[in-house]
Image (tube, rainbow, N blue to C red):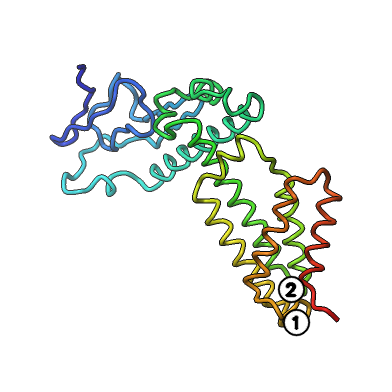
Amino acid sequence: MTKPAACEVNGHEHHREREGDDSENLHPAGCTRIHGGLSPTTIVHAGNFTIHSVSLNRKCIDPRKTYTDVVPKLWNDTIDAHRRAVRDATIDTTAALVTKHGLRGVTMSQIAEETGIGRATLYKYFPDVESILLAWHERQIAAHLEQLAALAHQGGPAVKRLEAVLDTFALIQHGHHDNDLAALLHRGGHVAHAEQHLKGLLRALLSEASADGDIRKDVPPDELAGYCLHALAAAGRLPSKSAVQRLVKVTLAGLRQSR
């Protein structure tokens, strides 16, 4: 087995892999020798992504300093941003490929080629296609929850904010369809966590609207929140947005205080 290349910094060896070298295998700042005769500016390649670090100072480094003392914070921030960029690009590319070819028609090799990164690098981020899709779904759910929370906390009467939240949630449900991909994505525990979060958001709105006299008081807000979630889940099977809007009106009618 070939021994990894190494450079020596004050008597300590720092290794890197000869193949698949990316942002996970970086030389620490202060190396007295740069492999391959490169300039003191380290260049990190990962597919289509390239990072140029700040120039390294060749002066001697105090051996009593730790790695985090030597490496500038800017360097760490740049590497973190690079990793997020690779992760996001992988997720976006996979979602587009699955939309085009179907769940069973996408492989890790296709994703690596389309994203422009090596397969070895790709496997450092995700073990398989399913894990990439679950990460995409988690990101989508987080964005939806943020959108619904913004509507819940805007100004105006609680009943109006409740209506805006229910209408938006129903339209989100309408955009999702029952298929193999949906069955896969809803296996994750993140879905149950998101439902609990949304239920709590609705419960708070319903309690506020009930205190205002706009929502019925004979049923606890927690039960009403569950009623809303179950009723509007049917929006995913409706044929049009107008049908979704009618479902929201019927749901709101069931919530209102009888006069």
Q: Where is residue 104 in the image (x, y as percent from the top left)?
A: 57, 25
Q: In which quarter of the image is residue 195?
A: bottom right
Residue drawn at x 85%, y 56% as measured from the top left: 246
Q: What element carries label 2?
A: helix
Q: Where is residue 81 in the image (x, y as percent from the top left)?
A: 47, 41
Residue drawn at x 63%, y 24% as measured from the top left: 101
Label of residue 212 in the image: 1
Cα separation, mark 2 vs mark 1, equals 8 Å
Q: Pointer 2: what residue? A: 158
Q: Position of residue 11 (x, y in %)?
A: 13, 35
Cβ–Cβ below 8 Å for labels 2 and 1?
A: yes
From this viewpoint, which residue is outermost toward the top? 1
Residue drawn at x 77%, y 58% as measured from the top left: 167
Residue drawn at x 54%, y 37% as measured from the top left: 133
Quadrant of image for the C terminus: bottom right
Number of numbered discs on residues: 2
Q: Which of 258 and 107 is in front in this view?
A: 258
Q: Is mark 1 on a helix, strand or loop?
A: loop
